[in-house]
Amino acid sequence: MKNFNQRDFLWILPLVFGLGAVLSFLQSGNWLIGWLGFSFLSLLSFSFLTLSTKWADGGKTLAWMVILAFTLRFVGGVVTYLALPVYGYVDDEDQSVGFTYTDAHRRDAQAWDLASSELPVYDAFNKTYAYDQYGGLLAFSALIYRYLSPDTHRPLLLVLMSAFMSALALPFLWKAAVREWGVKVAVAAGWVYALYPESVLLGGSAMREPYLWAFSAFALWGFVSSGVQELAPADHDNKWPAARLWLALGIGGMLLVSPVVALTTMIILAGWYYFTKGNVRIPWLLVAAAAVIFVAGLFLLSSALNRSGEFNSSSPLYVLSDWLKLAVQWDVYQLERGSGWVQKLFDEMPEWMRLPFVTAYGIFQPVLPAAFVEPTKLIWRIISILRAAGWYSMLPVLILSIGAAAGQRVEMKRRLFLWLSFIVWMWVILTALRGGGDSWDNPRYRAILFVWQAILAGNVWVWWKESRNAWVARVFAMELVFLVFFGQWYANRYLHLGPQLSFPLMVVLIIGFWALILFWGLWLDRKRSV
């Protein structure tokens, strides 16, 4: 990576010390200790972001992406931390102390308890600290508190770290995308990653997703730079050591934070190689290492899921399948119990339709019309609208990713993008089942593979710019139909505006309009081809 020059220190040092002073003032405890802790962590963050941005050779475009990505996430995290105790639901246990996510609050509290105790940090991996299912992020958080904030609890340290890790993924995503698919895809994917509202909210919270995005980007670059997926990789031998390092760092980090994401990433990369391989032969040591890591990841995951001792079997696959089945059943039950109209629909529909309904309901969460009309505090209305608008911009793009993949002229690229689209959609469906109708957990689970979603979105954008394919407008028109009908339904439900359509009738009408758009588009395409 490229080195600093004197001009870098001219802006980094004043910014670091000034930011450290302001953040220390916003938190309790000894001001000097807080200033030193915030300044040290800021110095590391800005130094690594500057180094990685220069190394990625993205010029001013990438630099602005990284600046905006970090600023939006960090400022957003600080603003919500300060605003929620005043303008949020002050009776809520999490919001009263500035936390957006319950998981972040509980993990943060346990991290401080561990850091301020006499126990070693690796105790985060035992069953006592159950709020971090896997222990890795809890241990890292406790490490920061113990050595950078020994006198008092300063949650903004973890917000700063999350924003840094989230922004750090960008240079690696850029570098890999430029190498594999060109600058146009890299620019589009980079802006999607930097500005997507759900990633901004998560990136400003002490959650595991920002770390998983960074580790995913490390693994992506390590895999791409290794050249194993190319027909004739250049200077393959010279690139292997660094590639192995980034790949190992990415997979290893994911194993500590979330083994299921590590296993999913290995499946993605294995499929990538399978569908695009040529005459390149992977060293058997690498294959053996991957097999060992995969098996170890299965045991780590099953062990983490079985921390409570709920499952009697020692088989990892049994624990995983049983846990998923119970989790889906519990989420369906919670959805039915928490909503009167869902309970009414469940009573009216055959039992076999309930799971498909929950899946579809989960895919459309957070529902954009509901964000505008459901009664809530102003701060939550703003957050909800931004999150929902982001997803309803991404959802048609992910649908179109299949068409964009099929439209690739190069066979290997076509197979690769079809594979990535398949994995992303399987993940969306799985998280819809796992999260049910929950408008918070469901989108959060879905965003775990956000790095890959951004790549698909970048490819769709370039495909549309080059082809001006008519199906882009048609898919967005189908989404508009959905929004109009559900907008009226929610407006009637909460504001008593307009006629009240029964839910089954509304679904039938939406599907009918979708069919009209679909067949009309197919007829136009056929007419033009004649």
Image: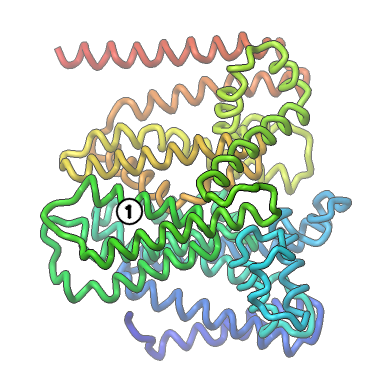
Identify the image quadrant of residue 179: bottom left
Q: Is residue 314 depicted above or below 398 in this figure?
A: below
Residue shown at the point (30%, 63%) measured from the top left: 288
Q: What percent of the width, then of the height, locates residue 400? A: 36, 33
Residue nearest the viewer, comparing 411 with 329: 329
Residue shown at the point (45%, 78%) measured from the top left: 48
Which amino acid does the dot numbered 1 rest on? Answer: Leu
Residue nearest the viewer, comparing 269 with 370: 269
Q: Is residue 248 depicted above or below 429 in this figure?
A: below
Secondary structure under tag 1 reads: helix
Residue 240 visible in the displayed image: yes
Identify the image quadrant of residue 329: top right
Q: Is residue 113 depicted above or below 180 in this figure?
A: below
Question: Which residue is at the far front?
Answer: 313
The N terminus is located in which quarter?
bottom left
Q: What percent of the width, then of the height, locates residue 422? A: 37, 38
- Count of labels in the image: 1
The residue pinned by badge 1 equals 269
Q: What percent of the width, then of the height, locates residue 201? A: 61, 54
Residue shown at the point (33%, 34%) measured from the top left: 402
